[in-house]
Image (tube, grey):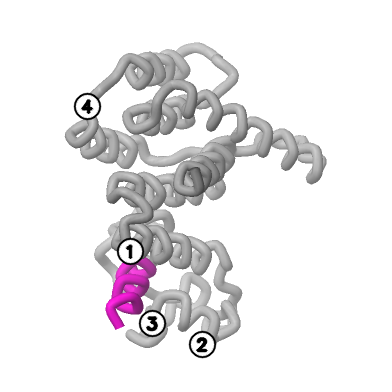
Amino acid sequence: METLLILLLGASLGSFLGLVVDRFPEKSILWPRSHCDSCGQTLAIWDLIPIVSEMANGFRCRFCSAKIPVSYCLLETACALAFYLGWVGGLSWTQVFLVMLSLTLSLYDLKNQDYPLIIILLAGLVTLFFWGSNTTALVLLLLGILAQILPLGIGEGDLYYLALLALTLDLPSLLWLIQLGSLLAILFIISHKEKRAVPFLPFLSLAYLVELGLMEMG
């Protein structure tokens, strides 16, 4: 029963993060109540049960049958697993926090190829409080600021995200993460024959998840 409650709590946090991606910063995250974006129908409490309600309705609104993106269910599932691993000690709570943040920023980047800087700023302050600063993080932060002025071939948002991860990773681990993220992005571009700009942060996030998994296995 305890495991089920922990998974439900993690999935609920994931559901809330999905709401944040949908609404912030253009709309309030508190009002109005959750509703279908297609038909505007307010959702009942049983429509908001993470993962279960989406699967039960076939990833469609039960009122108008509009498709619900599978990405929301994936976010809820990933957050549920991360929260459970934090509870049993497989991940530190800092790592759980960064996993959830990585997933949220990835959704923002996939949706808008950008994310609100206030999110990374607040996350940075929280992480800085527990881990302190280091030279690598400061260099990446300065590069992020510079990227807003000069073209560096990488977005400032990606550099700010790497600066945040640098607070908890040593330099070799961070360099390995960047190389893996770059490789994944290149493989995606080649396999999909993409000619438009591809957001990089989701691949960095995926590389971070892979690195966490390898760290636990090792």
**Residue behind mark 3:** 43
Q: Which residue is mark 1?
A: 13
What residue is at 22 percent from the left and 27 percent from the top?
A: 132
- 20 on left or right of 64: left
Circle nearer the viewer, 1 or 3: 1
The answer to which of marks 4 and 3 sits earlier in the sequence is 3
Amino acid type of disc 3?
Answer: Leu
Q: Amino acid at mark 2?
A: Phe
Gap in angstroms between the C-alphas marked 2 and 1: 25 Å
Asked whether the residues under the numbered discs 2 and 4 touch, taking CB atoms below 8 Å apart as contact, a structural biologist would say no
- Residue 202 position in % (x across, y down): 55, 43
Which amino acid does the dot numbered 1 rest on? Answer: Leu
Q: Which mark is residue 132?
A: 4
The residue under label 2 is 63
Q: Which of label 4 and label 1 is nearer to you?
A: 4
- Name the amino acid type tagged 4: Gly
Q: Which of pointers 4 and 1 lies earlier in the amino acid sequence?
A: 1
Foreground pick, 68 / 7: 7
Mark 4 or 3: the one toward you: 4
Q: CA distance from mark 4 to mark 1?
A: 26 Å
- Please provide percent x and percent y for residue 98: 36, 45
Question: Relative to the observer, which residue lies in front, 85 or 29?
Answer: 85
Q: Secondary structure at mark 2?
A: loop
Q: Is residue 3 magenta?
A: yes
Q: Which residues are magenta?
A: 1-13
Residue 44 x/y as whole percent: 35, 86
In the picture, measured across the screen, residue 104 lies left or right of residue 88, that is right
Work out whether mark 2 precedes mark 4 in sequence or the reverse, and give the earlier one.
Answer: 2
| Label 2 crowd (10 A; few <14 / some 14-19 / many >=20) | few
